[in-house]
Amino acid sequence: MNSFSSVWARLRSRSRGRYGLLAGCCFFSALLITAYAFMMCAPTILEVLPEGGDSRKQVDMIFVLAVLGCAVFTAYAAGLFLRQRSQETGVFLALGASRGQVQALLLPELCVLGLTACGAGAVMGVPLAFGLWQLFRFFVVDSGEMLLRFDFNALAWPLAFSLYTVLMLLWMGWRSVRRASIMEVVRQSHTAEPVRAVPRRYGWQGILLTVAGCLCGYLVPTICVRWLHWYAPSLFTAPFYLPALAGLYMILLHTVANGWGRKALWHRDILSVSMMRFEGRQTVRNMLVMTVLIGGACFAGFYAPMLGTGSMLSYDARPVDFAFHYRADQDMPQKDEVLELAEKYGVELTRWAEAPMARLGVDGEHQVETESPLGVTWESVYSELDASALFLPERGWNALAGESVDVAPGQAAAVLDASGSSQGRFAPAIGLVTNTATGESWPVTAAPPLRHDMLFGHFVLDDGDWAAMTAGLPGDWREQMVFFDVAEGGDEYAFAKALFNEIVDRSGPEVAQHSSWDPVVRQRYIEEEGSYFLDRETLLANGESAIDYSLRDSSEFRLFWQYMPQFRVLDKADFVCTLAVFLILFVFICVICFAAAAVIGFTRSLTIALENRRVYGDLRRLGASRAWMRRSAQSQVRRVFTVPAAAGIGLIYIFYSMIMFFNDGRLSTGELAGLGSCLLLIAAVAAALWGVYRLAVRSVFKALDL
């Protein structure tokens, strides 16, 4: 060995574990981001998640958290690696090597390591995403729309992260060599980032900041929209969550420095507590990243139990077994045909009720949006012919609902859901009803609202008023609603499936419309903008999916067809298939984020062994028992896992409950049941973290020869 490069190569071969740890951290971070990015950008996903919808916003938000977490994690791994190599760097400088020579040896290998690890992660991320998706399809649910298609433009995300990683490694490597004195470089491997004296008030102040940040971050966008009439850009609203992040940091800092127990008992774990404090800043940063990732995993994981529990309860709460409606100009199955079909499958009908409905124009307000440099602003504009709604005569209501109501002439009774809420989807009080065929209008006042889940959003009129207001309406503005129940027995699912297919087959292309499609709103858009965004031609021209009878089993069709029947047995049996893409996507995100948190926790636990091996060796020579040292090491590992798990799971559960409450100012029965089912997911996450914790403890014991 007659050159610096040969000596450096020999030292590198003796430090394979350090290089492997850094490469593994970079590889895993790139792997995670690649898998997530390809799933997030896959056409299979984008065709199902509505643009601008809450589901897509959740996916994007968790992705941002994952990227930030991985960025901090790789920076931590790089700092740990350079600190462990600092003694060798200092010796080179002491032997006469210039800083430029050391940089010429260190920086290229950091660059190669970063590029190789991130490149391998990016390459493996695609088959990982595909493989996990196929496993979900095989073991959980499979449907025609579950065929996964990738958009390789998603490579921009792992490439950007790889660039960040390489530049970060080069900058940190350059900075580690450019220190002021050789002794400072030599001593770097023996220094740490201890936590200074932390006031005990940090605990409750952190809790207050976290709560205030969550409230502000969630409520500020709502305040901007409702009070300021301004759709504020995310760059303005997102910073309001920062106090929550600061508060969480203060909570973790207080936990590491002071703990939450009685100070008199600290002597029992004085060694582990002191070690945690000595490396406090590193520990807190890792705990913060783990907390965010565990919170993101739970936030994504809550989607399935919340949706599943709420949907099943709503299906069971339906007052009728079968309900469908159709336009009067469509040739739909009548009662005798339904009875014949039911007999074929051994199903007995116990009740049949049907009633006419008519689509009439109603007054109201709509939003007029204006683009501005600071975002979109809006104002409400009243219109005497603002939208349309379906109206029933009171005799029709009595037949369908099995109730007897008497609506006074000149009044209109809105139908709310069973809990008495309009869900913010329509205005129960209207003042003007218009026959769009004749142009004649009638003023009305609001009657006491009615409640019925299957007729939600409709209005009920006096029989005489209904006849007068609907006179002259053509068939495409009239509809028929059918309710019927069946007795137990027979192949009810096969009957429901056959009737559903019969309804779809006999529906014309003119009723292949989105559930939000409104002929009155369409006319206004065409007059003002020349096209209607929900027309089939406009949707296809914009690259969006339209209602397609050939895709009748897809989630797009089942969720958004305007004339989708509501058959209890069919909806319950096909629930998972109907929402397969939604459910599997969020399960995938949950698994990815949880895996990232587990790897970070495991890595941090191993560094406890790597950095404190000498301390435990000295303790062994001083006579410390093996059991006492095992308890000390286990106590440190336990804090690495339990504190982020408790903070991440607890905070996200409270935050999720807050979102459910602020949606409509209450927690419905379905939401309460869903939150209860989320506790099962929390138990599963806790059990999985416990398994990783036990594996980490065994690895630390092995590394410390305990």
Image: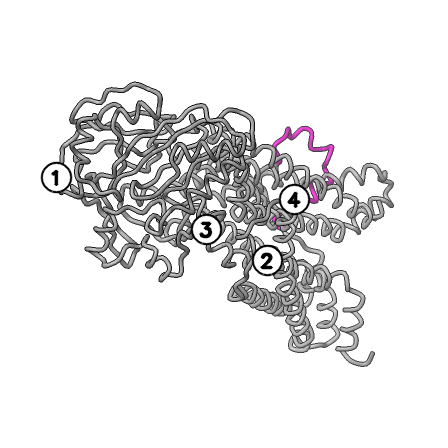
Toward the viewer: 675 or 290? 675
Residue 671 can be seen, yes or no: no
- Pointer 3 local density, CA inside 10 Å: few below 14, some 14–19, many at least 20: some
Q: Residue at x 21, y 26 (%)?
A: 463
Q: Nearer the viewer, mark 1 or mark 2?
A: 1
Position of 218 with respect to 581 (left or right) is left
The location of residue 8, given as percent across then percent down, is: 76, 73
Precedes in sequence: disc 1 or disc 3? 3
Q: Amino acid at mark 3?
A: Leu
The location of residue 654, given as percent across then percent down, is: 50, 34
Q: Residue at x 75, y 77 (%)?
A: 5
Element carrying mark 4:
helix
What residue is disc 4 on?
277
Element carrying mark 3:
loop
Image quarter in which the N terminus is found: bottom right
What residue is disc 1 on?
440
Residue 358, image quadrant: top left
Q: Nearer the viewer, mark 4 or mark 3?
A: 3
Q: Is residue 432 magenta?
A: no
Residue 467 can be seen, yes or no: yes
What residue is disc 2 on?
35
Q: Amino acid at mark 1?
A: Glu
Precedes in sequence: disc 2 or disc 3? 2
- Pointer 2 local density, CA inside 10 Å: few below 14, some 14–19, many at least 20: many
Q: Nearer the viewer, mark 1 or mark 4?
A: 1
Gap in angstroms between the C-alphas marked 1 and 4: 79 Å
Precedes in sequence: disc 4 or disc 2? 2
